[in-house]
Image (cartoon, grey):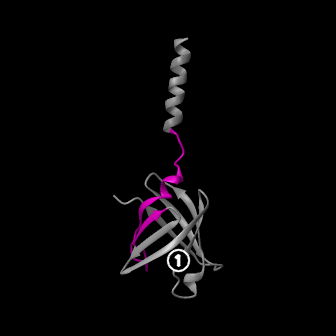
Amino acid sequence: MKKIIVFFIIITFASCANEPLNPDRFKQGNFKIPASKGYSATFITRIDSLQIEKYDDRIDTLTIHWKNNFNYTLKMVHPKNAIDQEPIHVKITNINKESYDFEAIIGQSNYIQKGTLILPK
């Protein structure tokens, strides 16, 4: 009987250690997209269905609609030009402990922007 109990305890701890990374932790909170070629660092705050982005001297507010844990759509609340009126379709391609990689497409374009969103330290 003791062997069976020890076996179940070992299985329980092993299954917790191998728990898949949950993307829900990226749906609310503060994040950063590091600067990359042609882009400044972007600081993001997500509250409910809003995403507030701060970069350079600008602040943009977007609505965020999660289709599932790996796909969401962003739309500017106050678009300033035609391209700002287009939705941004985002696909999470890889999840790590402190970040995720994504691909973003504006509207129906063929241009895919790749990036990484991280939890700031």
Q: Residue at x 57, y 84 (%)?
A: 83
Q: Position of residue 15 (x, y in %)?
A: 54, 34
| Residue situated furthest bottom in the rendering | 81
Tell which residue pokes out farthest to the top in this image: 1
The amino acid type found where label 1 is placed reads Val
- The x, y position of residue 34, in whole percent, is 40, 69
Q: Give the magenta-colored segment's residue range.
A: 18-47
Residues packed near mark 1 inside 10 Å, few (<14), some (14 to 19) or many (20 plus): some
Q: Is residue 16 magenta?
A: no
In the image, is residue 29 part of the stretch drawn in magenta? yes
Residue closest to the far left? 121
Number of marks in the rendered image = 1
Q: Is residue 68 above or below residue 54?
A: above
Question: Residue sitting at 50 percent across and 26 percent down?
Answer: 10
Determine whether the residue tagged by mark 1 lies in a helix, strand or loop.
loop
Of the pair 20 and 28, the residue shown nearer to us: 28
Does residue 78 lie above or below 116 as drawn? below
Q: Position of residue 12 (x, y in %)?
A: 53, 29
Q: Quadrant of residue 103?
A: bottom right
Q: Which residue is mark 1?
A: 77
Image quarter hosting the N terminus: top right
Name the quarter where the C terminus is drawn.
bottom left
**Looking at the picture, how far across and down is residue 108, in whole percent?**
66, 79
Q: Residue at x 43, y 72 (%)?
A: 53
